[in-house]
Image (cartoon, rainbow, N blue to C red):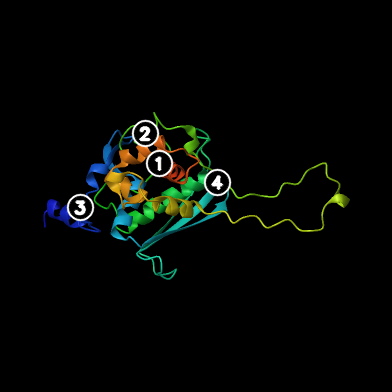
Amino acid sequence: MSQTTDTNIISSINAVEGFDPVPYAVDYTDLTTGETRKRLPVMIQMAWFRLKYPEGKISVEVSPGHDCFVARARVYPNYKDPAESYLAEATASRGRCQDKPSVSPREWAQTAAVGIALRNAGFGLQFALAGEDFSSSAPDEFAMELTADMPDEFAMELTADMPVETPEQPAAAKSETPPPPPKKELTFEEKLEAAMKQPCPISKYAGKTLGELVALDPKALVWITKKFDSASEIGAAAKLICNYALEATA
């Protein structure tokens, strides 16, 4: 069997009619060897997965380690599948990068684990690199210039409301009523899941979600971030998706 035939067979894995991941692959140059290889960004892997499995689920668990976060990602064809009935899984650990203090090691570990799990499930096997991320400079997720027009508020660190104790308050004066429990903080995966399911506000793509827009027209997703205020639900969702794409290449 020829190498071309082998490549064609691999390319047919997880094939989705009307979707070709090749145009979304970007070049990555190894700074050590100078070798240039094709890389499929994690965001495109996720969009591909959503097209293949509309009711699929990506589960991510993160735990703190020694000077790092360890993430485990599992890929399921259906959100109703039992915990152990996953297509593939992967783990990744990331610590804080001194050269990029704004990059969250927790979300970096999540991104790496999700990308590798999707690669293990067959999303991107035809590329030299899929599901990989790099601490050095790498092409952006959408293979176009996003950073020039994107404000810093794309780094959306959403935290639960926690009760604040005033230092000057005497212990005896404190109310005996216990403070309300803190609101449950959504995981990054849950926030991203909700953002990807937001309906697209562009009439041309009526009936489509922002997640589908990633594969159909990523420039339109960037346009939404500019036209909709970040305080709006749709604007915040679009910016979260773009921010995820940028952090995946950090």
Mark 1 element type: helix
Q: Is residue 95 left or right of residue 15?
A: right
Lower sequence index among marks 3 and 4: 3
Closer to the chain start, of discs 1 and 4, is: 4
C-alpha span from label 3 to label 4: 36 Å
Residue 120 seen in the current view: yes
Residue of label 3: 18
Q: Are marks 2 and 4 in contact (CB under 8 Å)?
A: no
Mark 2 Cα shell of 10 Å, populated few (<14), some (14-19), many (≥20): some
Task: Give the CA separation, mark 2 to mark 4.
Answer: 22 Å
Please state which of residues 248 and 57 is positioned toward the viewer in this rendering: 57
Q: Are marks 1 and 2 in contact (CB under 8 Å)?
A: yes
Q: Secondary structure at mark 3?
A: loop
* Of pointers 1 and 2, the one earlier in the residue sequence: 2
**Mark 2 sits on what residue?**
146
Question: Between disc 3 and disc 1, whose residue precedes?
Answer: 3
Q: Compute the Cα span from label 3 to label 2.
A: 25 Å
Residue matched to label 4? 158
Disc 1 designates what residue? 242
Residue at the front extreme?
203
Separation of disc 1 and disc 4 at Cα?
Answer: 16 Å
The reply to whether discs 3 and 2 touch (Cβ–Cβ < 8 Å) is no
Q: Are marks 3 and 1 in contact (CB under 8 Å)?
A: no
- Amino acid type at image mark 3: Gly
Of labels 3 and 2, earlier in sequence is 3
Q: Amino acid at mark 1?
A: Cys
Asked if residue 20 lies left or right of residue 209, the reply is left
Mark 2: amino acid: Leu
Residue type highlighted by circle 4: Leu
Q: Measuring from the top left, give residue 171's x and y in whole percent.
A: 85, 50
